[in-house]
Image: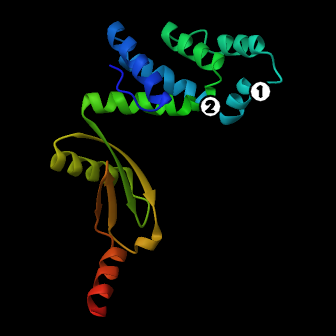
Amino acid sequence: MALGGSAARRYAEALLEIATEEGQVAPYRRSLEQIATSFTPAVIRALRDPRVPLERRREALTASVKDEPKAIRAVLDLMIERDRMSILPDVIRAYGDLVDRREGVLKAKITTTRALESADQGDLVRSLEQASGKTIRATFAVDQSLIGGAKVQIGDRLIDSSLRTQLDHLARDLAR
């Protein structure tokens, strides 16, 4: 399954391959997401600290992930041995992206001028899902400089219906 690319992506692809063989794709994702919350930047720095002998760092890592799936523990052990712990957040993100792509889930970033109520967020996501025919996993942001309307980023596609952009276009047209 390895498609090349970044080291983080290769680790993620290896984990996904094992998880698929074991029928454990979703549990691996949950495990990795739990690790992401526990392994803060400070923890990762400590696991990379060359002043602490590798064996002590490895013992700390092993103790902290003892309940995680064997393949995840093995990958983390390999990462600490190769001084690759700094890319752990990227590995976790890449695993999630690979699973999403495989399941046909698109990520969207929706930016509005004010925070939307959860019902409005749900309505907007459902509209995007209907229009795209895909499942959408959305994150929401607020940018008051948009004045009104919204920006929706799905993959490389940007749908910008903000009042700020419309005013900018109008100003350019009038300047001609």
Q: Position of residue 92 (x, y in %)?
A: 49, 29
* Residue toward you, 126 or 8: 8
Residue farthest along the front direction in this orientation: 4
In this picture, residue 80 sits left or right of residue 106: right
User: In this picture, is 27 found above or below 94?
Assistant: above
Q: Is residue 123 above or below residue 75?
A: below
- Percent position (x, y) of residue 168? 34, 80
Q: Which mark is residue 86?
A: 2
Q: How many marks?
A: 2
Q: Choose the circle earlier in sequence order: 1 or 2.
A: 1
In the rendered structure, which amino acid carries the disc numbered 2?
Answer: Ser
Task: Tell me the residue that label 1 is attached to.
Answer: 49
Which residue occupies the foreground of this view, 131 or 95? Answer: 95
Quarter of the image that includes the N terminus: top left
Q: Residue at x 27, y 53 (%)?
A: 124
At a point 31% along the width and 85% down the height, the residue shown is 172
Could you tell me residue 4's position as x and y percent? 39, 28
Residue that extends furthest to the right in the rendered view of this protein? 51
Which residue is pictured at 33% across the width and 54% down the height? Answer: 153
Q: Nearer the viewer, residue 142 or 157?
A: 157
- Residue 144: image x %, image y %? 46, 70
Q: Which residue is drawn at the image coordinates 30% and 48% (left, top)?
A: 122
Instruction: Give above or below for 45 relative to 147.
Output: above
Which image quarter: residue 170? bottom left
Secondary structure under badge 1?
Answer: loop
Pick the quarter of the image with the C terminus.
Answer: bottom left
Query: Along the horizontal axis of the image, is 169 left or right of 63?
Result: left
58 with respect to 118 (left or right): right
